[in-house]
Amino acid sequence: ATGGAIASAITDVAGSSDYFRGSLVTYATEAKVAHGVPAEVPLLHGVISRETAEAMAAAAREQLGADLGLGLTGIAGGDEIEGQPPGTMHIALTDGERTEYQTYAYYQGRDAAKRRATTVALDLVRRWLLDV
């Protein structure tokens, strides 16, 4: 839903290579599955869902060999998908044992939706790291 905006925001900071392993931009369901999301998850729960976000977070963590995996799926703009309006985002963060999840709907245009999703996702990581 952000098209790489989260990775871009992280790598805008000098020294980010000390803690950032990479990102997976998986717009299509097939790309999500190719990068480790079990095919049945989006089929059973929808591609725009908590379960898919959590599976994406787990897959990113595993694929990148990272301590934390962040997964975000949503609708930045356009038409309603799976009964969910534009601006709906599902965000998950996991360390393999514990998972945090957040969802919201905010739509003031595509760019604003992507910026808000990036901010909310990075805030979720920040709060995790600060343990608040």
Image (tube, grey):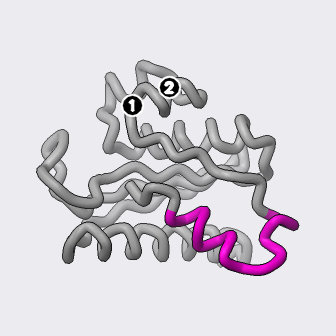
Screen quadrant of the N terminus: bottom left
Screen quadrant of the C terminus: bottom right
Residue at the spot 32% in from the left edge and 43% down from the top edge: 48
Q: Position of residue 39 (x, y in %)?
A: 45, 20
Count the marks: how many?
2
Residue at the spot 31% in from the left edge and 72% down from the top edge: 111
Q: Is residue 102 above or below residue 44?
A: below
The chief SS type of the magenta part is helix
Is 79 in front, or is 56? 79
Q: Is residue 39 left or right of residue 55?
A: left
Q: Position of residue 80 (x, y in %)?
A: 13, 49
The CA distance from mark 1 to mark 2 is 6 Å
Q: Is residue 77 above or below residue 118?
A: above
Residue at the spot 48% in from the left edge and 41% down from the top edge: 26
Q: Tell me, for residue 113, which label it has, or none.
A: none
Q: Position of residue 103 (x, y in %)?
A: 37, 61
Amino acid type for the residue under numbered disc 2: Val
Residue behind mark 2? 33
Q: Magenta stretch containing residue 36, yes or no?
A: no
Residue at the spot 51% in from the left edge and 58% down from the top edge: 4
Amino acid type for the residue under numbered disc 1: Thr
Mark 2: which secondary structure? Answer: helix
Residue 130 position by quadrant: bottom right
The answer to whether the residues at label 1 and label 2 have Cβ atoms under 8 Å apart is: yes
Is 44 in front, or is 121? 121
Q: Is residue 75 above or below residue 51?
A: below
Residue 93 position by quadrant: bottom right
Tell me the magenta residue range. 5-19
- Disc 1 crowd rating (10 Å Cα; few below 14, some 14-19, many 20+) is some
Residue behind mark 1? 29
Q: Is residue 116 left or right of residue 97?
A: left
